[in-house]
Amino acid sequence: MSTATVRIPVEKRDILKIISSIEKRDLKEIITELIDEYIERHKETLELLSKPQWVEAIIKGKEEVKKGVKGKSILSLSQM
């Protein structure tokens, strides 16, 4: 597995080091866990953005919001 260098501000790095020593865990393990959690939280967004019809609906919806169009029924979106 390849690795990458990540720059962490000193004050945050120091806090992470304190936490890792209290938990008796490797700093790398904590950072990997945080990255995994971040990816998991964004999987649904990535899945939606991989479907062109949803991207079009999102763009159209943002344009409608800017124009002040009132809300729609969720039923119209569920047919996508």
Image (spheres, rainbow, N blue to C red):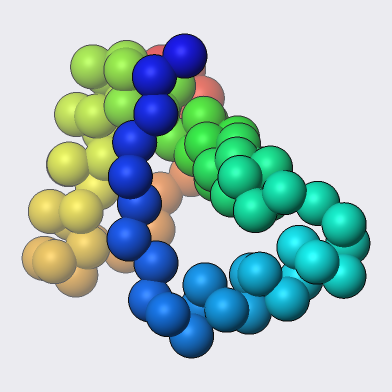
Image location (x, y in percent) of residue 12: 51, 78
Image-based side of 19 in relation to 59, left or right: right
What residue is at 44 percent from the left and 35 percent from the top? Answer: 45
**Res 56 → quadrant:** top left
What residue is at 38 percent from the left and 76 percent from the top? Answer: 9
Image-based side of 19 in relation to 45, left or right: right
The quarter of the picture where the C terminus appears is top left
Residue 50 sits above or below residue 33 on the image: above
What residue is at 80 percent from the left and 66 percent from the top? Answer: 21
Image-based side of 58 in relation to 14, left or right: left
Name the one closer to the observer, 24 or 65. Answer: 24
Farthest right residue in view: 23
Residue 27 sits above or below residue 28 on the image: below
Residue 56 sits above or below residue 13 on the image: above
Residue 1 sits above or below residue 10 on the image: above
Farthest bottom residue in view: 11
Image location (x, y in percent) of residue 75: 53, 32
User: Is residue 34 visible from the viewing direction of this image?
Assistant: no
Image-based side of 65 in relation to 30, left or right: left
**Res 54 → quadrant:** top left
Name the one closer to the observer, 68 or 17. Answer: 17
Image location (x, y in percent) of residue 33: 67, 43
Image location (x, y in percent) of residue 57: 26, 33
Name the one closer to the observer, 67 or 40. Answer: 40
What residue is at 20 percent from the left and 53 percent from the top? Answer: 62
Count of numbered tags: 0
User: Is residue 46 visible from the viewing direction of this image?
Assistant: yes
